[in-house]
Image (tube, helix red, strand yellow):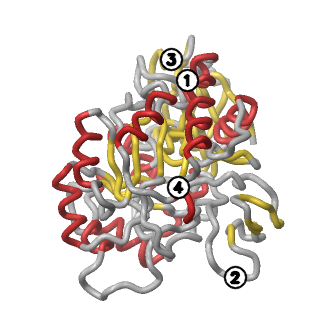
Amino acid sequence: MIFRAKHYQTEQMVDVCCNDGKIVSVEKAGNFVPDHQAAYIAPAFFDLQINGAMGVAFSDINLDESGIRKVLSVCKLHGIESICPTIITNAHPVLIHGFNTLRKACESDPVIARAMPCFHLEGPYISNEDGPRGAHQKQHVRNPIYDEFKEYQEASGNRIKLLTLAPELPGAIDFIRKMNLEGVVVAIGHTAASPMIIREAIAAGARLSTHLGNGSHAVWPRHENYFWEQLGCDSLSASIITDGHHLPEALIKTIVRVKPFAKQIITCDASGLAGLPPGKYSMWDQEIEILSSGKVVVPGTPFLAGSGSFTDDCVAHLISLGVVSRSQAIEMATNAPRRLLQLPEIKIEAGSTANLILFDSNKDVPFRVNRVIIEGEVLNKS
């Protein structure tokens, strides 16, 4: 299979030849007859925070393999070749069930295993305060317990590689140190911590801010707060939801301009409602509404109740703001999160896995995926 397009980094027209799931060669365009052609070619996305999609939530007690396949299928159609399935704050049996189900799916099908190289536990060790807690259920929030986490890790088959917690909780700093020793990347998120505790968490080994700017109080101290402390730390990576709903344009631009580029990661934080049409739905024991704009809210209010976007939406919105280049936005959604979790990078070069996207990008359409290639095979066409 031969794909012709401009390389997303060099802007040179190339022929990318693929065989048996791998890129065989990348040559200057013109030596072959392409099977598919588009404006640009880039690696497919990896998103480290996907909670579900199409009515399926990974944190649901009824999660099964068919639901997992449904989520992965729609993600791939949006150019997301692999994800960290994310399980959030819930009762202990629900978390055990979720990780068991994800593990068994990986063990039963190598295609699923490649699409979910590791798992993300977001909570239950987070702040119980309104604002920082976000949409997580208060009754299930609790302090970090190492033995409990080990049960989740065992259920996952040792696949939990990312853990989001609030470092101000009793025992959290020591917990962070233990996670580092076990190879689990710790992220600060859903926190009401003081700046001093944020610094302690970073010193203990925290390496990421989960969806920086979200999961916070509506009002905080002007200077001394957990947001500035995380934003100002050059060693701390930050994931941001750039869907146009979660963060205002000025804040996105500020984060992107302040953080070292290598530390910036795009996530869509897709909820179980992502991909569904506008309307009212029941999830997390409450009514949720998807507006015609795609924003997910508590009905009758402007308050967010999750994300209805996918990674390609977030890349498109960020490119439209003009604060980063096209190739930089793609890097934030592909290899930046892979490096954080020590996963192999996908590059457009011989020997790399042929997980690619063909996309359009111009003054009228900042970014639009029109073909997705997984292991050398085209999944969809525009």
- Dot 3 amino acid type: Lys
Residue count near mark 3 (Cα–Cα under 10 Å), binned few <14, some 14–19, many ≥20: some
Q: Which residue is mark 1?
A: 113
In three-dimensional space, the C-alpha distance between marks 1 and 4, rounded to whole angstroms, equals 25 Å
> Judging from the image, what secondary structure is the residue with disc 3 in?
strand
Q: Residue at x 28, y 33 (%)?
A: 182
Horizontal side of 131 relative to 104 (left or right) equals left
> Judging from the image, what secondary structure is the residue with disc 4 in?
helix
Question: As displayed, is residue 245 above or below residue 167?
Answer: below
Which residue is farthest top?
20
Contact flag, marks 4 and 2 (Cβ < 8 Å)? no
Residue count near mark 2 (Cα–Cα under 10 Å), binned few <14, some 14–19, many ≥20: few
Where residue 154 sits in the image (x, y, percent)?
Answer: 45, 28
Q: Which residue is mark 4?
A: 315
In three-dimensional space, the C-alpha distance between marks 4 and 3, rounded to whole angstroms, equals 25 Å
Whether residue 81 is visible to the viewer of this picture, yes or no, is yes
**Image quarter for residue 173?**
bottom left
In three-dimensional space, the C-alpha distance between marks 2 and 3, rounded to whole angstroms, equals 48 Å
